[in-house]
Image (tube, rainbow, N blue to C red):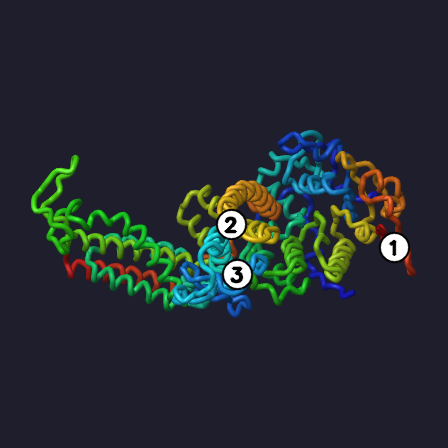
């Protein structure tokens, strides 16, 4: 990982307004073009870290550098900085409902580019490009709330791809998707990464980790970054997974023909 | 697995991270929704009894588990059937009052307001520049305020209904929206003024004959207690006038897509903070109502048999508290999602405002119409 550093976090801690700890002393770097998975049990702080990376929440202690500049509230209040940053980093929320707030799919996908102040012709080109790419033609005039869960997720992804970000932050992207849509999404993410997009995915879906990660960051339940490694290293470290409460004693994995692995627990 | 075609622009590299100048927004497409909304596969007839008092507790309503899918699936009966319904009225239907109200609100919000289905129809007003619409609406509301003669006002109202018709606004729903509400609220306000007790005048209908004047506390009661001609006419004029104003405002909001309307308000110097509040409300009111409606469904799925009205009340008050917390969390989330995609608080819509010939003609027509109605009103005299 000798590439350019996009994000650098130094000793970042975040507390909820109530004083509850969500992140404790996080040090990490994210490099251009890599795919990183944030792995941890529910409530370990993965989502908070994504929000911190997207400049939606600001850490109480520590500092973040994004694209070589300090990422803080003051900088994001400057319109030029904020636009430059938001153009590069996009966030796919876990809850598609909250992310889809426009009257039609077309407008939903156009929202980002329109906010960025792109030319109308360019906005149209991008929206139509993304619609064609993700096969959303048949729903483009429908209100997003009428779509199925899988379609909602597609629209949510389309709505950030139209911004053409360099980096995608995804919060539990495969949650609630059927197997086919899930497979489709994993392939899409791999393709986007192969095309140069940096991916940071928060998940606890062990099955897809080795497909969408070059590097896995493991979080403990006390909100610390406890291990970093390749998917193979992390997933074969049963002790580690047990310690961070991601798996139970019954956990084991199968290696099928052709090297496909999957991980699960028998009751 | 089927591979997707990634468009070339998506692979373009961004310029280096030194914040570039933001491009200015100029010429944009106009009324995009209009072109795209046509033939939408989800067209739902918004006329369906949205304010009607029709009985909605037909089949499936009696079993507590019978209705866990979407809200208000069975709310399409015409109002006329209300009296003829022979299902179990009373306890069950009354118990669901809050729930039904919320379901209906969610549906109306979703179908008509949020999805902007009427605004997406091809109609006359839908094609007019939103700035022209906002300004002419304001002008016509002032005209309505200046008119005095009931006959002129009635003709004015009929003309507004014609405007609604040529804009393909469903007439029944439009009339209900205006004329069920206006007489109720305005009527209550002007009711006292029709009696000679408040406003002396020529008696039109004598209610009581007291025989002589007498004092009741600080008031002097007249010899006869009657409805006066002046009072009744004044009340009538006020109700029709308010009706006309409300009709115009309803027509504007129905035929203009909300984001475009907000952008127009921004252009005509409505304060930014006001628009931001409206915009956020709009963005998440649907989620809010959906959450409320889900809470009732969730409760229903866990309830066996009937609950007493005391329990119902307790649930509603508890639900209000929970909803408040949820709404707060959701509003944060929606706001974060907007900010993440570049929202800065300024309304931006993909709509270019550009005056065309039709817009100028329309503006002229509206001004002429306003002057015509005012003139007619003067000629009829008062």
- In this view, which residue lies farthest toward the left? B212
Q: Chain of mark 1?
A: A
Q: Mark 3 packing: few (<14 Cα in 10 Å), some, or many (20+)?
A: some
Residue of label 3 = B61
* Apparent side of residue B262 relative to residue B10 in the rendered image (left or right): left
Q: Which mark is residue B285?
A: 2
Pointer 2 or 3: first along the chain: 3
Quadrant location, the C terminus of chain B: bottom left
Observer-nearest residue: B334 or B310? B310
Does the residue at mark 1 contact the one at mark 3 (Cβ under 8 Å)?
no
Residue for badge 1: A261
Camera-side residue: B243 or A53? Answer: B243
Please determine whether, in this image, residue A249 is positioned above or below residue A254: above
Query: Badge 2 local density, few (<14 within 10 Å), some, or many (20+)?
Result: some
**Residue A4 pos. (x, y %):** 78, 43
Chain to which the residue tagged by mark 2 belongs: B
For the point 79% across and 52% down, the residue is A212
Quarter the N terminus of chain B occupies: bottom right
Residue A218's spot in the image, x, y percent? 80, 41
Badge 3 element: loop
Q: Is residue A36 left or right of residue B77?
A: right
Q: Is residue B345 visible?
A: no
Same chain? Circles 2 and 3? yes
Chain of the residue displaying label 3? B
Q: For the point 49% across and 44% down, which residue is it?
A: B310
Residue B122 percent location from the top left of the image: 45, 68
Q: Nearer the viewer, mark 1 or mark 3?
A: 3
Residue A183 horizontal side relative to residue A112, left or right: right
Q: Secondary structure at mark 1?
A: strand
């Amino acid at each position: 990982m000798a590439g350019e550093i996009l994000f650098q976090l130094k000793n970042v801690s975040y507390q909820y307004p109530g004083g509850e700890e969500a992140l404790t002393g996080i040090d990490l770097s994210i490099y251009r073009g890599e795919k990183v998975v944030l792995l941890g049990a529910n409530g370990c702080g993965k989502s908070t870290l994504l929000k911190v990376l997207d400049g939606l929440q600001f850490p109480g202690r520590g500092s973040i550098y994004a694209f070589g500049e300090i990422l803080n509230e003051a900088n994001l209040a400057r319109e030029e900085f904020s636009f430059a940053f938001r153009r590069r980093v996009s966030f796919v929320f876990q809850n598609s409902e909250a992310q889809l707030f426009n009257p039609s799919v077309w407008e939903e996908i156009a929202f980002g580019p329109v906010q960025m102040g792109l030319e109308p012709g360019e906005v149209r080109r991008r929206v139509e490009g993304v619609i064609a790419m993700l096969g959303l033609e048949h729903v483009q005039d429908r209100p997003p709330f009428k779509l199925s869960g899988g379609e909602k997720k597609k629209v949510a992804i389309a709505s950030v791809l139209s911004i053409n970000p360099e980096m995608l932050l995804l919060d539990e992207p495969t949650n609630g998707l059927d197997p086919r849509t899930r497979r489709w999404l994993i392939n899409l993410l791999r393709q986007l990464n192969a095309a140069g997009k940096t991916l940071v995915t928060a998940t606890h879906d062990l099955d897809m980790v080795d497909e969408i990660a070059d590097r896995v960051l493991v979080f403990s339940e006390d909100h610390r970054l406890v291990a970093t490694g390749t998917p193979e290293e992390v997933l074969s470290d049963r002790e580690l997974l047990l310690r961070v409460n991601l798996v139970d004693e019954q956990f084991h994995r199968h290696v099928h023909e052709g090297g496909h692995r999957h991980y699960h627990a028998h009751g | 697995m089927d591979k997707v075609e990634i468009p070339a622009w998506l692979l373009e590299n961004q310029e280096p991270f030194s914040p570039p100048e933001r491009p200015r927004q100029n010429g944009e497409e106009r009324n995009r929704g209009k072109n795209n909304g046509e033939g939408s596969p989800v067209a739902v007839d918004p006329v369906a009894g949205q304010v009607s008092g029709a009985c909605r507790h037909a089949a499936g309503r009696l079993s507590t588990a019978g209705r866990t899918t979407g809200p208000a699936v069975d709310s399409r009966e015409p109002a006329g059937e209300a009296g003829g319904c022979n299902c179990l009225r009373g306890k069950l239907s009354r118990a669901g009052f809050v729930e039904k109200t919320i379901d209906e609100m969610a549906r109306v919000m979703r179908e008509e307001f949020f999805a902007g289905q009427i605004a997406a129809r091809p109609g006359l007003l839908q094609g007019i520049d939103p700035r022209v619409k906002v300004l002419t609406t304001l002008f016509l509301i002032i005209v309505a305020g200046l008119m005095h003669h009931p006959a002129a006002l009635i003709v004015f109202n009929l003309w507004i209904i014609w405007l609604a018709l040529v804009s393909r606004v469903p007439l029944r729903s439009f009339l209900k929206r205006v004329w069920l509400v206006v007489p109720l609220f305005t009527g209550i306000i002007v009711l006292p003024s029709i009696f000679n007790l408040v406003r002396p005048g020529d008696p039109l209908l004598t209610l009581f004959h007291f025989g002589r004047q007498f004092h009741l506390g600080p008031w002097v009661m007249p010899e006869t207690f009657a409805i006066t001609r002046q009072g009744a006419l004044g009340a009538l004029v006020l109700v029709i006038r308010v009706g006309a104003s409300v009709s115009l405002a309803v027509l504007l909001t129905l035929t203009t897509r909300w984001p475009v309307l907000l952008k127009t308000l921004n252009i005509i110097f409505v304060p930014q903070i006001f628009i931001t509040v409206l915009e956020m409300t709009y963005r998440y009111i649907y989620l809010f109502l959906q959450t409320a409606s889900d809470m009732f469904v969730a409760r229903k799925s866990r309830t066996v048999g009937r609950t007493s009205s005391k329990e119902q009340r307790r649930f509603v008050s508890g639900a209000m508290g929970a909803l408040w917390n949820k709404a707060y969390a959701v509003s944060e989330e929606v706001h974060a999602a907007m900010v993440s995609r570049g929202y800065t608080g300024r309304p931006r819509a993909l709509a270019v405002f550009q005056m065309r010939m039709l817009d100028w003609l329309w503006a002229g027509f509206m001004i002429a119409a306003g002057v015509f109605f005012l003139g007619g009103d003067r000629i009829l005299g008062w």
